[in-house]
Image (cartoon, helix red, strand yellow):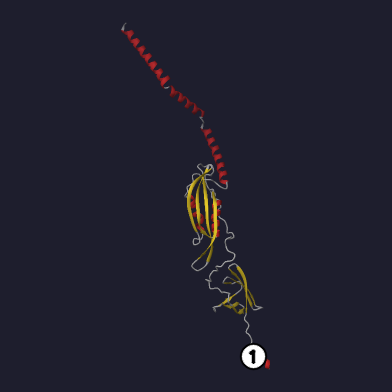
């Protein structure tokens, strides 16, 4: 075999080897990769949107989101997502900021977190003392707040607090359990929470006693009608003296201890008062004292 034929056969063998090796690599080694790449290419072609289509789709989804957010915002209550347990403490601080500091005591205790169906809630215990209208404001704010809060249990009782001057204040002791709701997703809350109107006006104090044993002290040194005497009626008003000898010049409508001077009757030489003695309304009339005639002068007149 000549040299030229040997070279030709060698090249042919090398070509066959390269072809076989390339076929094994392409059809065996790369077959799985090619299949995955075809699947990925098919998926990309299925979602091949142009810029205009993407822009239109974005606008449509944005409009739908705004509508859904508006619906949630217009609801009376929302359930926020992943609410912090500290937020309720801040809420009560804001609500109670305008309460009478010397008559209000508010204690908040965090109990635990509990699940309820697809929601969760934090449980708190509130207890303390305050005026009836302050306690009513706190209850109203909790129940009417935008982020859902519910009072589970409530206990109220009356108490009397007296300051250093002896002035009584009729207060309310309260104890309540409050649940504050939240969710693990944002399906039940709008993007921006706007608080409801949680302020309310004063109402009648149902714990204020109709008849009270505690009477406020006479700190302003007003006329105490009890034991007082009408000394004279003058055009400027009525001249009176109390049981201690202190004198007062009063006119109609002026305040006295526990009440007011309501009428000066010049025709009958009399003054009238309306007093509120611990819930008991009393009308008191004082008349000018008449000097009795001297008995000796009477006897002389009889003898004559």
- In the image, taking residue 152 as reference, residue 267 lies left or right, namely right
Residue drawn 64% across and 89% down? 295
| Most distant residue in the bottom direction | 304
**Where is residue 147 shown, x and y percent of the image?**
53, 48
| Position in image of residue 14 (x %, y %) | 35, 14
- Marker count (numbered): 1
> Label 1: which residue?
297
Q: Quadrant of the C terminus?
A: bottom right
x, y percent for residue 63: 56, 40
Residue 110, above or below 23: below
The answer to whether 52 appears left or right of 268 in the picture is left
Which of the 4 image quarters holds residue 15? top left
- Which quadrant of the rendered structure holds the N terminus? top left
Name of the residue lying farthest toward the top: 1
Closer to the camera in the image, 132 or 234: 132
Please tell me which residue is depicted at 56% across the width and 46% down the height of the picture. Answer: 73
Who is closer to the viewer here, 102 or 13?
102
Q: Residues within 10 Å of mark 1 (few under 14, many from 20)?
A: few
Identify whether 62 is placed above or below 5. Answer: below
Say above or below: 181 vs 36. below
Q: Seen in the image, is 104 located left or right of residue 21?
A: right
- SS for callout 1: helix
Q: Quadrant of residue 288?
A: bottom right
Q: Measured from the top left, where is residue 132 in percent x and y?
A: 55, 59
Foreground residue among 133 and 76:
133
Q: Can you name the residue that lies furthest to the left here?
A: 3
């Amino acid at each position: 075999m000549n040299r030229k034929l040997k070279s030709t056969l060698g090249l042919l063998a090398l070509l066959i080897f390269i072809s076989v090796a390339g076929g094994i690599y392409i059809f065996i080694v790369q077959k799985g990769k090619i299949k995955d790449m075809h699947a990925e290419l098919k998926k990309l072609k299925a979602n091949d949107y142009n810029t205009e289509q993407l822009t239109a789709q974005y606008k449509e989804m944005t409009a739908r989101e705004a509508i859904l957010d508006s619906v949630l915002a217009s609801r009376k209550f929302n359930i926020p997502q992943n609410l912090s347990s500290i937020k309720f403490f801040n809420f009560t601080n804001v609500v109670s900021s305008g309460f009478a500091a010397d008559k209000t005591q508010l204690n908040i205790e965090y109990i635990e977190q509990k699940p309820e169906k697809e929601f969760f809630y934090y449980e708190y215990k509130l207890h303390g003392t305050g005026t009836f209208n302050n306690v009513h404001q706190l209850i109203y704010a909790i129940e009417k707040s935008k982020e859902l809060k519910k009072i589970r249990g409530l206990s109220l009782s009356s108490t009397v607090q007296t300051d250093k001057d002896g002035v009584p204040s009729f207060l309310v002791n309260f104890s309540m359990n409050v649940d504050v709701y939240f969710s693990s997703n944002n399906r039940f809350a709008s993007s921006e929470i706007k608080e409801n109107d949680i302020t309310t006006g004063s109402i009648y104090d149902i714990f204020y006693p109709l008849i009270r044993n505690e009477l406020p002290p006479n700190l302003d040194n007003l006329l105490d009608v009890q034991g007082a005497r009408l000394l004279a009626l003058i055009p400027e008003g009525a001249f009176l003296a109390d049981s201690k000898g202190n004198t007062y010049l009063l006119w109609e409508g002026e305040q006295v201890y526990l009440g007011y001077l309501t009428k000066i009757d010049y025709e009958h030489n009399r003054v009238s008062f309306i007093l509120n003695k611990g819930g008991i309304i009393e009308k008191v009339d004082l008349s000018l004292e008449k000097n009795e005639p001297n008995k000796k002068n009477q006897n002389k007149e009889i003898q004559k």
